[in-house]
Amino acid sequence: MTETIAQAKPALSSVAKISILGATGSVGVNTLDVIQQHPTKFSVAALTTNTQIDLLYKQCLKFRPKLAVVVDEKLADDFIAKFDHDDFKPELLVGSHGLEVAASLSEVDFVMAAIVGAAGLPATLAAAQAGKRILLANKEALVMSGGLLMKVVRLNDSVLLPIDSEHNAVFQCLPKGDDKCEVEKIILTASGGPFLSRPLNEFENITPDEACAHPNWKMGKKISIDSATMMNTGLAVIEACKLFEINIEDVEVVIHPQSIVHSMVAYPDGSMLAHLAYPDMRVPIAHALAWPQRISSGVSTLDLTKIGALEFSKPDSNRFPCLQLAYNALEAAESATTVLNAANEIAVEAFLNNRIRFTDIPTVIDAALQQIEHEEANDLEVILTKDQQTRVFAKNFIDRSLLRH
């Protein structure tokens, strides 16, 4: 295993200014919750949303950012009109370019990259090019871009800290500073979602509402579906390989229904370090905001006597075919992971709209991986072109072969 993803820099002596990309999503809301607990340490410089302008308006009044970004241009006038009778009005940018501006403001120290899916990649790259400390909650950015994002981070002396609970847990368990001891393997845990014990012959009838009802975590719809299919874990495996620069054979996945152990790192002497916490995104958010120090997240310390037994098991490939598809993509040429992600986004959207069955999601992804030519993903243009090509293919495949009438 190579060096860890971030080298410690001196703690900021003044108030750290933060841009939150995807402020109205679950990670963005939790980030603001942690920030408001520490008003002398953090302030908000920019907030962004795609369509949730009502919530963004409330957030702006409370945190008073310099900049607000509404990606959906049709909603810009409605959003700015909300401030007509207020003594505060942020600068407003509209469209996806505004995300890149928010990510690279000169006064910003930290960027929370919490936009779900491929839409967050250009802004995350902009933050890296500007040398920001990036709190990466958007695993798709690494899944799509392969080594490109990591290269830009290194070239611009940026810092990348993982927010996904699994990767943040791994980061906390890895050797620190000048400690160069070898790592045997990384073990990522996955809850198994809401269908861990549901009979396989009932999977065709799973509804979007059922798939979104995660037993442990409160998440957005897309991530909840990914958890139910275990594509979220498949993406996590890819992200771990890119983030920590390790081989696929050095990453193991185990089912852990309680979501208390978030990941583990095994060492050659037989030792295994684990990160344990209640399933609450404020824990990794607070860790990344304060790193290399620690601050309160607002989450209680574990009471192990109340938790009781912790269970672990191997994932069933028949129950979770998306996990194997992620492994297949990682083993193929670099753009295969871009194809995997794009096809999954289209399939999940179609399922949420009741256009395909739950069991059709891996079918769409597999067809895309089989039919679309893979190549090296050397720059953003290649990545975005492959992403768009896959989306067109997946939509046509659904309309042609899977559409429910």
Image (cartoon, rainbow, N blue to C red):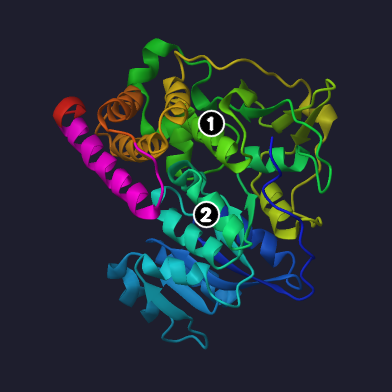
Residue 9 at x, y = what percent? 76, 62
Which picture quadrant has residue 368?
top left
Q: Amino acid at mark 2?
A: Ala
Q: Characterize the magenta stretch by its predominant secondary structure.
A: helix
Q: Which residues are magenta?
A: 375-399
Contact between labelled residues 2 and 1, with CB atoms less than 8 Å apart: no
In the rendered view, tell whether residue 89 sits above or below residue 58: below
* Residue that numbered label 1 is attached to: 233
The quarter of the rendered structure image containing the C terminus is: top left
Cα–Cα gap, marks 1 and 2: 17 Å
In the rendered view, tell whether residue 7 sits above or below residue 70: above
Residue at 33% from the left image edge and 49% from the top image edge: 382
Q: Amino acid at mark 1?
A: Thr
378 in the magenta segment: yes
Residue 391 at x, y = what percent? 27, 42
Q: Nearer the viewer, residue 331 or 103?
A: 331
> Would you say 244 lies left or right of 301 here?
left
The quarter of the rendered structure image containing the N terminus is: top right
75 in the magenta segment: no
Residue at 38% from the left image edge and 18% from the top image edge: 203
Pointer 2: residues within 10 angstroms few (<14), some, or many (20+)?
Answer: many
In the rendered view, tell whether residue 272 sits above or below residue 152: above
Q: Is residue 26 visible?
A: no
Q: Earlier in the sequence, mark 1 or mark 2?
A: 2
In the rendered view, tell whether residue 394 sits above or below residue 89: above
Q: Which mark is residue 114?
A: 2
Q: Is residue 168 visible?
A: yes
Residue 201 at x, y = what percent? 38, 11
Which picture quadrant has residue 314?
top right
